[in-house]
Image (cartoon, grey):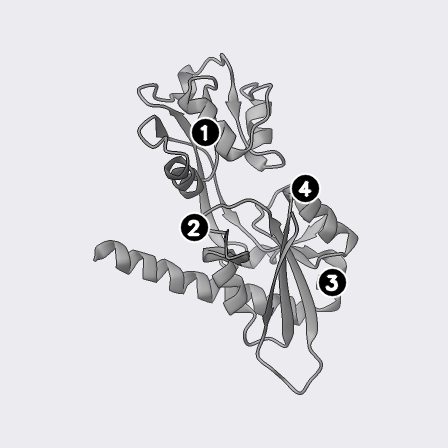
Amino acid sequence: MLMALIVMATPSSAEQLSLKICYEDNNYPPYIYREDNVGKGILVDIITAAAQDTRVSLALYSKPWKRCQQDVISGEAHALFAMIETDERKKTFAFPPENKLSHWYLWLAQYPVFRAKGKPFVAAQYQPKTGIGAPFGYVVLDILKDKNWLSPYQYGPKEGLKMVAMNKLDGYVVERQIGIHLLELINHTKDVEVSQHLMLQSNWYLPFNKGFYESHPAVVQTIWRNIAVQRKKIEASISEGAKN
């Protein structure tokens, strides 16, 4: 399903640059979800705030993850979120400069293994039975495949967690907070637990189409720089809320 959210940046007498950004069309609270057919969540808040003091008109829309990637490659979209940087992806997408990678990111993501309650996951002892699932097109899926741990059956996060709860899948790997929220949504919190072991911990980024970045490096770098500022504000707010 294609869904668009238009957010106009600060008005200016100068000509505005139109910026189209694609994101995966799944509800992944607290990072991205739909409410009254409008995209909301932490990542949307960060990106829209980061664009406020730039001369851009911002349009966010959703598609399946692989199609988002194709849109950016073709130039149909200018950027997408949220993506983990890999050597292979750097050949295709423009990520922040190497000396800024540790600062200009959207969020730090953790990917544990969600297992049936009472069946703790110990990586050194794991022997696949039904295998472990992960979302299609994600870096963690390739990690599982390289270890020969990947389930032969592919499930989206919600379906995968249901299969884990029913003991039909050894485990499922998805970002921690997304998995926890989905378990609440499908009423399986009491049936599934989160491993201490992380299959992956990595930053999420807002990468751009390479041609667009080469044409507008100052605008893109300003947005990346602002993303870091906005992320820190939200992190501080979450930290303060946890103390209270």
Left or right of 67, for residue 197: left
Residue 167 percent coordinates (x, y): 42, 17
Which quadrant of the structure image shows residue 56? bottom right
Residue to which mark 1 is pinned = 161
Between disc 1 and disc 3, the foreground one is 1
Residue to which mark 4 is pinned = 66
Left or right of 229, for residue 4: right
Are dots 3 and 2 in contact, CB under 8 Å? no
Residues 169 and 200: in front is 169
Q: Residue at x 67, y 62 (%)?
A: 20
How many numbered discs?
4
On screen, 126 above or below 237?
Answer: above
- For the question of whether residue 91 can be seen, the reply is no
Q: Earlier in the sequence, mark 1 or mark 3?
A: 1
Local crowd size for mark 3, using a 10 Å CA cut-off: few (<14), some (14–19), many (≥20): some
Amino acid beneath label 2: Pro
> How far, Cα to Cα, is label 1 from label 3?
38 Å
Q: Earlier in the sequence, mark 3 or mark 2?
A: 2
Q: Residue at x 47, y 23 (%)?
A: 163
- For the question of whether residue 237 can be seen, the reply is yes
Which of the numbered marks, if any, corresponds to residue 8? none
Q: Which of marks 2 and 1 is nearer the N terminus?
A: 2
Are dots 4 and 3 in contact, CB under 8 Å? no
Residues 77 and 88: in front is 77
SS at mark 3 in the image: helix
On screen, 219 above or below 174?
Answer: below
Instruction: Find the residue positioned furthest to the front.
Output: 36
Residue to which mark 2 is pinned = 30
Amino acid beneath label 1: Leu
